Amino acid sequence: MNNHHYNFNLESLIRKNILRMDPYISARKEHKSKQKYIFLDANENSFGSTLSFFNSYNRYPDPFQKKLKERISKLKNIPISNIFLGNGSDEIIDLIYRIFSRPEIDNSIIFPPTYGMYEVLGNIHGANIIKIPLTKEKFQLNIEKIKETINKYSKIIFLCSPNNPTGNDLIKKDIKTLLKIFTGIIVLDEAYIDFSHEKSFYTEIYKYPNLIVIQTLSKSWGLAGLRIGIGIASEEIIKWMNKIKSPYNISVISQEIAIKALENQDLFFFHIKNIISERKYMESVLNKITIIKKVYPSSSNFLLVKTNFSSTKLYKYLINKRIFVRDRTKILLCNDCLRITIGTHEENKCLLNYIKKYSLSI
């Protein structure tokens, strides 16, 4: 363990009201099996659901998603006790604010352009949001500026790597520098890590007890509709997340489908390979179109693309052609930029043809 964290005291970072609170004890928390008991404790409908062919839906889900966590534990080779599952990554971010950030007192540091929910949820929880822009063009952390800005009220730092909307990896050395110097909580959002050549940071949780790594089943596993976010952190942090989360935060059907989906690793790797291949194809074609000024390097399943003129006009033109991309022009450092998700080959071809047509028409 690093010297800096030798005296790391998690409780000193936790809000006092959270330290004092008694958690809600769900009716199903004590029971391990649904086979051996008559369940008359949770005010469920004992006669079954209206989906008669799926009778299990009249019962509440496992509040701690044990079977799904076991599957993730095997995949990632980390203990269940280091895994938290949320209703999307957004629930995990929300819980982190609830546990650590005192409203109107503490600040969290974010690095725009980045994922918008760090700021939105921070504002909901009354955190003071400090913004330190990423460097121009390369979109990297400004370590010196961060060192100058950190103060005794700095509780949480949010990093996103690969970053959304820019698509690039943050430099590993910079992340490690922050982990060594910051005495608060560092959240590293790795929603797009499976599309990157960089390795995940989650094995570093044993070295840095203030690190929380967030991943998701929405992107590379293609399960956005299920809303399952993964938090990986020390046992102590996971215990606090479990203490304050909603009792049944992930539905029975989401857990069941996720378990089945995680068994299909061959298809998972096949999709990632295709997405990376299509990303390279898109990049090469876009670079040859005259209205495209720059295609930023990407380690994700999208490209940030800078146009030579109004990105909003191109965005509206594409909507008229029933193609939806994201106009990011109003976001810091992303003037006249579109964020384009990598689609199927047919979808990508269609998009590129329309951009070519538009380029020739102006």
Image (cartoon, rainbow, N blue to C red):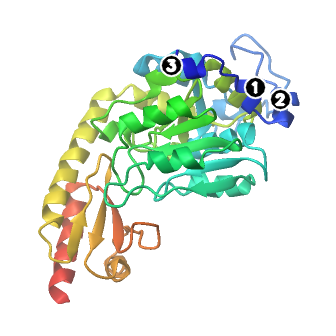
Report if the CB atoms under discs 2 and 1 are less than 8 Å apart.
yes
* Residue at which label 2 appears: 19
Q: Which mark is residue 267?
A: none
Real-space Cα distance between discs 2 and 3?
Answer: 25 Å
The secondary structure type at the circle numbered 3 is loop
Residue located 27% across and 74% down the image: 307
Q: Which residue is mark 1?
A: 11
Task: Judge by depth and name the residue closer to the eye, 360 or 162.
Answer: 162
Q: Earlier in the sequence, mark 2 or mark 1?
A: 1
Q: Around disc 1, counting alpha carbons within 10 Å, would you say few (fewer than 14), some (14 to 19), or many (20 or more)?
A: some
Q: Is residue 128 left or right of residue 277?
A: right
Which residue has dot 3 on it? Answer: 207
Q: Earlier in the sequence, mark 2 or mark 3?
A: 2
Label 1 vs 3, first from the N-terminus: 1
348 above or below 75? Answer: below
Quadrant of residue 91 within the rendered picture: top right
Please state the horizontal and vertical placement of residue 302, each as a whole percent of the image.
Answer: 32, 55
In the image, what residue occupies the spot 65% across and 30% down?
56
Percent x, y of residue 18? 82, 34
Q: Secondary structure at mark 2?
A: helix
Q: Judge whether 149 appears above or below 181 on screen.
A: below
Specify the amino acid type for callout 1.
Glu
- Is residue 288 shown to the viewer in this render? yes
Residue 266: image quadrant is: top left
Q: Nearer the viewer, mark 2 or mark 1?
A: 1
Q: Quadrant of the C terminus?
A: bottom left
Decide if residue 96 is on the left or right side of residue 105.
Answer: left
Q: Amino acid at mark 3?
A: Lys
Q: Is residue 111 left or right of residue 25?
A: left
